[in-house]
């Protein structure tokens, strides 16, 4: 009720502001819309509709600055234009991750954890430390972006959460000169949650610089990142309370009444990174030569730490070596170096050849239990790889090849990927992809130590070998189709093993398991958009099947259907979208969540699914501000209380949420 009152107050303020704007703004012509991710070109249209004429809108005091001059650059040098348009894709991304989470289902509180609704193949030769559920919210070196701007730029994203808190993501960037840009960004979250001991508190901070010399031959980019992902853990509601939840018992509609499995634990993922890369043009293209040669190198140092802390051991995790405070820690210190040459010419294409050096040091630390476990064990890995890539445009065909091959060292990983894209008329295309990865296991599957007896292992697993073939067909006015066939040899995952002992007590443990049999998965993704005047339907359907029995569990159907109405209002001073969204997945043995490891594990006890998640939303755009009002899972009280994010972890109840994204162009 409090949130709803805030919504009414905010809407009245916006409406008053809007009326004032309408009297100032003349009617504008229709302007085409571009989407985020479109590559820059001389013909890019303004993503902020012109309010005064057909020309690109002047957003600031600089009369020469237009929207297509505000550039966002990724580590791989893909460049996109700052986009302030309102699309249904933007609505899907107004969440903690700021990415479409179609193949994920979040837990009841923002930023705690996610469960997966599909299987994704490996896409990196580098093994991870572990705590993979934290990695979902962790900003990797490839997630950091750089800017090139004619005037200062600010973006604010706000999203309401679940009791006593908020989510705010702010970015400020400015070019101090035409050659130098810096940016500061901070994403902060605090949300108490509806269940006891389920608070989440995160901080993602980054500072970037982007320098281009006056002769445009030298480019230097750097960034510093500091991240802290903290969340209280309660083990979910107890088995004795499952019936009270599923029956909709009125005494338990206040979720704080539930007694969780424990109330004295939390986990935390911390990461610090310093990154720098340099590119120097040795030979530049000119009127006499179509050839260019670039020298590049990059280096970054990264330190990650994962902690599970509990004030007193609990039988929920089994027997402990000592009945005392639990303080399990994992550490990973990494050094990554990359250097090489890029040769490019029109007849031969683009060739990149270089070396990659990776040094990892994985270690453990536990609190005052040296008499029971060995904290001195570490994994040291130092490896050098040969890196090569080739790309070439043949008329309407794009060809890309990439390989990373082990030369010498400890981690004998290899990878190869290829993409052939056929471009047709009207932005239609057909892409064929092949990926191969032979990758060492994640470090926490090889070595783990804890005060809990069941969470100690020292394994010698083989590399997992993944082959995947993909087809992507884009028919702009009909549908998008993705077909993936994935095969994994020696797949590794966490599983829940139950031990039926003679006393009649079921003891269980969560352990990593490697399979000798092949894991094979077929995925078919269909995306379709239909417009009827001002009404639109956006549908996405995922059909998937694990051809290999008894290895992983997947829902055979995952679907999302959104029907919405779009219109301009108040002489086009406001653009409105409103409608319903329905997400659904078939029943399956959904993965469980282990808060000690921060990992998902395979279980075959409880089936979850076949509950619709229906949302009603109102999205609006006023100038460079996008507003998002959402009545989330409003059907929860009348379609049954049998909805979960994982066994013993109920999904979100009905709630009203508000969000906005606000851009400033000074």
Image (tube, grey):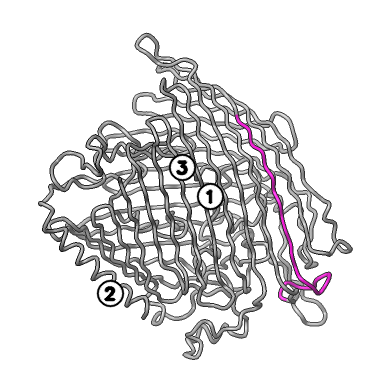
Residue at 58 percent of width and 62 percent of height: 553
Q: Residues within 10 Å of mark 3 (few under 14, many from 20)?
A: many
State whether residue 186 is above or below residue 396: below
Residue where numbered disc 2 is placed: 8
Task: State the extent of the magenta-drawn residues as a range.
Answer: 316-338
- Give the image location of residue 86, x and y in percent: 28, 54
- Give the image location of residue 529, x and y in percent: 29, 54
State whether residue 453 is above or below residue 470: below
Alpha carbons under labels 1 and 3: distance apart: 11 Å
Residue 546 vs residue 426: left or right? right
In the current view of this chain or complex, which residue is farthest to the top?
288
Q: Residues within 10 Å of mark 2 (few under 14, many from 20)?
A: few
| Figure disc tally | 3
| Quarter residue 410 falls in | top right
Residue at 35 percent of width and 56 percent of height: 661
State whether residue 516 is above or below residue 77: below
For residue 331: magenta? yes
Q: Nearer the viewer, residue 322 or 354?
A: 322
Q: Mark 2 or mark 3: which comes first in sequence? A: 2
Q: Secondary structure at mark 1?
A: loop
Res 139 label: 1
Foreground label between 1 and 2 = 2
- Give the image location of residue 341, x and y in percent: 55, 22
Res 145 label: 3
Q: Secondary structure at mark 2?
A: helix
Q: Secondary structure at mark 3?
A: loop
Q: Mark 1 or mark 2: which comes first in sequence? A: 2
Q: Residues within 10 Å of mark 1 (few under 14, many from 20)?
A: some
């Amino acid at each position: 009720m409090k949130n709803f009152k805030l919504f009414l107050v905010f809407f009245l303020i916006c409406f008053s502001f809007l009326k004032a704007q309408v009297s100032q703004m003349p009617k504008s012509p229709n302007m085409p819309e571009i989407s985020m991710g479109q590559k820059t070109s001389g013909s890019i249209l303004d993503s902020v509709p012109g309010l005064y004429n057909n020309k690109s809108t002047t957003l600031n005091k600089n009369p020469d600055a237009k929207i297509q001059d505000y550039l966002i650059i990724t580590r791989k040098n893909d460049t996109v234009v700052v986009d302030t348009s309102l699309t249904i894709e933007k609505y899907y991304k107004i969440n903690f991750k700021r990415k479409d989470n179609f193949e994920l289902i979040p837990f009841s509180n923002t930023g705690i954890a996610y469960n997966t609704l599909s299987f994704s193949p490996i896409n990196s030769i580098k093994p991870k430390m572990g705590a993979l559920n934290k990695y979902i919210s962790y900003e990797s070196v490839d997630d950091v972006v750089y800017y090139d701007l004619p005037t200062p730029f600010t973006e604010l994203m706000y999203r309401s959460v679940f009791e006593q808190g908020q989510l705010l993501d702010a970015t400020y960037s400015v070019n101090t000169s035409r050659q130098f840009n810096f940016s500061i960004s901070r994403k902060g979250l605090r949300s108490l949650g509806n269940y006891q001991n389920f608070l989440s508190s995160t901080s993602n901070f980054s500072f970037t610089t982007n320098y281009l010399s006056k002769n445009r031959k030298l480019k230097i980019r750097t960034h510093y990142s500091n991240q802290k992902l903290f969340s209280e853990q309660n083990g979910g509601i107890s088995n004795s309370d499952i019936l009270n939840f599923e029956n909709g018992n009125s005494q338990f509609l206040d979720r704080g009444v539930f007694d969780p499995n424990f109330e004295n634990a939390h986990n935390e993922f911390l990461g610090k990174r310093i990154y720098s890369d340099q590119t120097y043009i040795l030979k530049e293209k000119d009127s006499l030569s179509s050839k260019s040669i670039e020298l590049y190198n990059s280096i970054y140092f990264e330190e990650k730490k994962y902690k599970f802390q509990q004030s007193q051991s609990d039988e929920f995790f089994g027997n402990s070596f000592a009945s005392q405070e639990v303080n399990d820690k994992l550490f990973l210190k990494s050094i990554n170096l990359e250097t090489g040459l890029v040769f490019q010419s029109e007849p031969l294409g683009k060739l990149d050849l270089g070396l990659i050096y990776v040094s990892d040091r994985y270690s453990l630390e536990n609190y005052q239990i040296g008499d029971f476990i060995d904290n001195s064990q570490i994994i040291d890995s130092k490896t050098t790889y040969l890196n090569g890539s080739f790309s070439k445009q043949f008329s309407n065909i794009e060809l890309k090849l990439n390989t990373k091959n082990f030369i010498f060292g400890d981690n004998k990983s290899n990878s190869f990927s290829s993409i052939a894209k056929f471009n047709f008329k009207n932005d239609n295309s057909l892409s064929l992809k092949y990926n191969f990865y032979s990758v060492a296991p994640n470090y926490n599957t090889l070595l783990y130590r804890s005060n809990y007896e069941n969470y100690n292992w020292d394994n010698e697993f083989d590399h997992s070998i993944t082959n995947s073939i993909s087809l992507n067909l884009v028919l702009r006015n009909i549908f998008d189709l993705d077909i993936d066939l994935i095969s994994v040899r020696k797949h590794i995952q966490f599983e829940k093993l139950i031990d039926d002992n003679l006393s009649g007590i079921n003891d269980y443990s969560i352990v990593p398991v490697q399979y000798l049999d092949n894991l094979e998965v077929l995925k078919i993704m269909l995306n379709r958009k239909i417009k009827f005047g001002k009404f639109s339907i956006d549908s996405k359907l995922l059909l998937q099947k694990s051809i290999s029995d008894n290895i992983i569990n997947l829902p055979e159907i995952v679907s999302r259907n959104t029907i919405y109405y779009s219109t301009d209002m108040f002489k086009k001073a406001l653009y409105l979208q409103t409608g319903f969204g329905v997400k659904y997945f078939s029943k399956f043995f959904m993965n469980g969540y282990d808060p000690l490891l921060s990992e998902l594990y395979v279980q075959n006890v409880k089936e979850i699914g076949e509950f619709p998640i229906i949302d009603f939303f109102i999205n609006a755009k006023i100038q460079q501000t996008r507003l998002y009002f959402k009545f989330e899972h409003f059907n929860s009280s009348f379609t049954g209380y049998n909805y979960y994010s994982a066994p013993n972890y109920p999904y979100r109840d009905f709630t009203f949420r508000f969000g906005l994204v606000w851009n400033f162009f000074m």
